[in-house]
Image: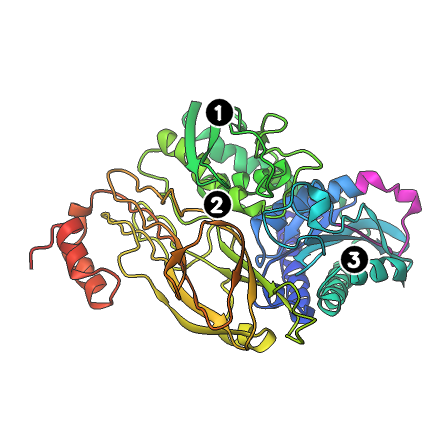
Amino acid sequence: MIPNTRLQVIWDRLLAVVEEQGQALMRAAFSPIVRECGDISAGIFDAKGRMLAQAVTGTPGHINTMAMAVETLRNHFPICDMRPGDIYVTNDPWIASGHLNDFLLMMPVFHDDRLIGCTSCTSHLVDMGGLGMGPDGTDIFDEGLLIPPCKLLDGGKLNTLLMDIVRSNSREPIANEGDIFALIACCETGADRLCQMMREFELTDLDEIATYIIETSRRGTISAIAELPKGIWHNSLKVDGYDTPLELNATLTIADDHLLVDFDGTAPCITKGINVPLNYATAYTVFALRCIIGPDIPNNAGSLEPFRVIGPTGCILNAQHPAPVAMRHTLGQMTPDLVYGCLAQALPGQVPAEGASCMYDLPLRHSPGAEDRNETLFALELVFNGGTGARPTLDGLSATAFPSGVWGSQVETTEAVAPVLIHRRELRMDSGGPGRQRGGLGQRIEMSASEDQDLQLFLSVERIETPAKGRDGAGDGAAGRIQLAENGTDLPGKGTFIIKAGDRLIFETPGGGGFGPASERDRGRLESDIDAGLVSVDAARNHYGQTS
């Protein structure tokens, strides 16, 4: 039996292993959204498919879906058929991470000829064919190539036919191939380091350390839940939707040893690709709750187990195959605000205000007919973020990804890989909701083609019509806005559009809501906001009551 102090050292070592695993993926990746923005996950699992450790780098949408997907793949493929050098892959949205562009890999790990666990990772591939990364598909078949669970490597031998199929169905075949090899390197790095750790600590299996990690985390989470008030709370959240607003509903039940979130009453699926598979909605819902409840407890199978999420089959947060789901993050990333509305009733004064939440994901590519005109062919996915909601004792964060965690696209990298020119990028004055704690600010970006060609833009963003609400008497954040500079036309938040050569696209990301009455804001902090250009003199007078 391993002493507890030594078990803790091994646990810490596992955390170091998964972090190196994640960094290997980012260093080797071809696509900027992976190597620059961290749109990934990486983890180590025991032989039963239970997540033991995850890399800090990564998104909840990838990490928490990976935690469920590995167990699914582990049950799909018999252990007796697994051998060293095997790697399994799928991009099935209902198994992996909610849409076709996310590839999930799982590699069985053998130590002394015995299966002791597995490594896994997920990342975003920039183009999987079909209509591309936009909301206008009418079913999953419009959205690209779906790969069912299968072997990518068989005993170390690459499935070249599968790679040929992926390349043949993409507008960015080289980037896709490179990113898949980066995923392979990620799994192999984790497996190598895991076996190295086992040799160093003279372990023959992970059973004891797995039990220690999972049970310690589960007990800690249940203890945190035990301190919460018990009861049932409900919240509704109005979102922009595609053509018309939609309503998301959640009922939160806090019991003695678990939490249950039920999406009953949520709007049904629509014929556009903003529907959300339940695995993805669950990932962000649980992440949001864990940010408040036991946030210091590591994320693994034990700490995730007491959180349960359900929803009526066919509601927009529990989409069923073959619903279109390409832009599932649009509403999936709104679920934290939805459940925080419940939790704020249970824990008044302890839950942040609403934020921009949905990242401003801007997939771009060449316009139709570009090849015939000898224009640059490309597919690129940019990510920008708005402001987070103010916290009970702190201001919101400006231009910061929450809940996604995906870092914003860098200007220099963007201009180096595609015919795109960024003219301006700055914080939006007065976009943070006024309050005792001010909401985080959004940002303003102006961009155009850097060459004489049109750009095709696929929009699916939120908070254009329904800005982030303040909490406890605070003001709302500013709504987002997307505009073409040439004629001042405002674009809706969702759809496919052409940016003409020479025209500028202006997009302003939303601000987060404030927390507490604006009249209670510290005068010194308000003056600092004015001096820094975050709050205008007029806003200070009108919203905060500043008289001088």
Q: Nearer the viewer, mark 2 or mark 1?
A: 1
| Residue 82 is inside the magenta segment | yes
Q: Earlier in the sequence, mark 3 or mark 1?
A: 3
Q: Is residue 1 visible?
A: no
Q: Residues within 10 Å of mark 1 (few under 14, many from 20)?
A: some
Q: In the rendered image, which quarter is residue 170 located in? A: bottom right
Q: Check disc 2 and report the residue beneath it.
A: 295
- The quadrant in which the C terminus is found is bottom left
- Give the amino acid type for the residue marked by disc 2 in the picture: Pro
What segment is highlighted magenta in the picture? 74-90
Residue position marked by numbered label 3 in the rendering: 202
Query: What residue is at 70 percent from the left and 47 percent from the top?
Result: 142
Q: Is residue 83 left or right of residue 131?
A: right
Q: Which residue is mark 1?
A: 253
Q: How many marks?
A: 3
Amino acid on which the number 1 mark rests in the picture: Thr
Q: Quadrant of residue 441?
A: bottom left
Which quadrant holds the N terminus? Answer: top right
Residue at image location 83% in from the left, 39% down from the top: 76
For numbered disc 1, what is the local secondary structure? strand
Q: Is residue 345 visible in the rendered structure shown here? A: yes
Residue drawn where x is 76% and y is 51% of the image: 145
Label 3 and label 1: CA atoms lie apart by 44 Å
Identity of the residue furthest to the left in this view: 548
Q: Looking at the picture, how far across and down is residue 74, in whole percent?
A: 80, 42
Are the residues flagged by discs 2 and 1 in contact, CB closer than 8 Å? no
Residue 443 or 192: which is nearer the viewer? Answer: 443
Q: Amino acid at mark 3?
A: Glu
Residue 210 in percent (x, y) is at 70, 44
Please provide percent x and percent y for residue 391: 34, 47
**Colour scheme in use:** rainbow
**Going by the image, does 390 lie left or right of 493?**
left
